[in-house]
Image (cartoon, helix red, strand yellow):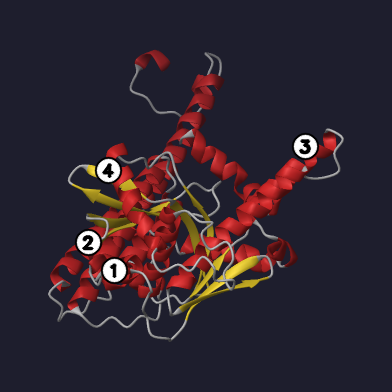
Amino acid sequence: MTGFTVYEKNNCFEQIWLRATPEDFNNPEEYLKKRINFMRNHMEEKIYLGFSSVLKANLECIIFKDRIFNETPNSIVFKAYLDDKVYYFPVIRFGISDDIVYIYAMQKNIKFVGEETFSKKINRQLYKVNEGVDINDKSCPNIMNVTSSFVVAGDLFIWLFNELGFKNFKAISPLPIRWNSKNIKNQKNGFACLKLKEKQDYENATEKFFNIFRRISYHNNNLYALQNGENLEVKVSEFEDYANNKVFNEIKSYNILNSSINKLIISLDKNYVVQTESDYKAILLLGVDSYNNGNLKEGIDYLKKIPSTSKYANKANKYIKQYVNEYKEGLFNQADELVKDDYYTKAINLLKDADTSIIDVNDTDIEAKINSISEARENYLTSISSNENKQETISASSKLLQSLTSNNINTLNIETSLSILK
């Protein structure tokens, strides 16, 4: 166990409140449910999006599990690449709960650093997002107060999750407890609250973060952004999906209906109706991924959804058989360890309590193992009883021998062929 893992384990409950908003503190139960959903809806996937004629590079996204002390358990980074040259967009930290995608942060990350010359080239191409912007449009003030790479990353993110079936997004304002720590520090130093510059930094950070999504909405006909309390909501409408900029229009043209995207749709949408061979392939991959991540039951549940008519049925059955056998082998090893310490009844109960959603109720291997241990238990109990009887006989004989003397031996009713005792 690494130091970070111990840190996460020991500080999970404490750290979780550092990511709460004022609204969350007013509804703590709902907040905890939301965070649990974030963890349940975790995902790890790499998806090829297509070739960008604007950036003149391939586009790919990587969804990965993040550290517990970051804002959310999931993060995503988009990257442009050509041969061995790579450019990384800002990392987006997000969580999913009740069909809403919560966006907590967009940040440059030192873990994702691209090749310098190639990155400069991509950044020059990204300036094209400014085409079609009316800087005199008073309905959208400070529209230019954004960074191009953040706008494109945000648009890619909303487009991708809209393809996955999500229409509601919520950008979360910078978290108050993190800024409140500055308050506490300032109060200790004689100040009443945030210093003027710190307050301006907080307000600027909030406004700049929200402006990214206002700008995305400005370009896309089917998106609208509306501030609701401390947060900014972004919704996908039923209006015609087009943009006033070729960068955003190209994003809408990507076709990602492949096994990777199917995996995400099926894992996130419990009501999704599986129909095609592509879906069955995605389920097969989900089953294997779940097993590899230690979720054996979930993996088997996925694999059992593949019908016998599918071309993936044989593979699914092969994996199910392998996983069931490994599950039973694990049970048998645990039972054998208990038997070594003479815990026969515990071993039998362990096998009787085997998960019947994984194995059959009357599994012959389990029954044979139980019978074998039961027989061993009977032999063990018989040997104990035999030893106890033997010990009693030895003890009685010992007492008799200790009571024998030359004076009383001839008075006892003992038969012997030895003349010396006659």
Closer to the chain start, of discs 3 and 1, is 3
Residue 348 position in % (x across, y down): 40, 56
Residue 102 position in % (x across, y down): 53, 65
Mark 1 lies on a secondary structure that is helix
Q: How many labels were placed on the picture?
A: 4
Mark 3 or mark 1, whichever is nearer to me: 1
Residue 399 position in % (x across, y down): 54, 26
Q: CA distance from mark 3 to mark 4?
A: 42 Å
The kind of residue on which mark 1 rests is Glu
Q: Residue at x 43, y 79 (%)?
A: 221
Quick check: 387 left or right of 142? left
Question: Compared with residue 395, is residue 368 higher up or lower down, i.e. above or below?
Answer: below
The kind of residue on which mark 4 rests is Phe
Q: Which residue is mark 3?
A: 185
Asked whether the residues under the numbered discs 2 and 1 touch, taking CB atoms below 8 Å apart as contact, a structural biologist would say: yes
Residue 54 position in % (x across, y down): 26, 60
Q: Which residue is mark 4?
A: 118
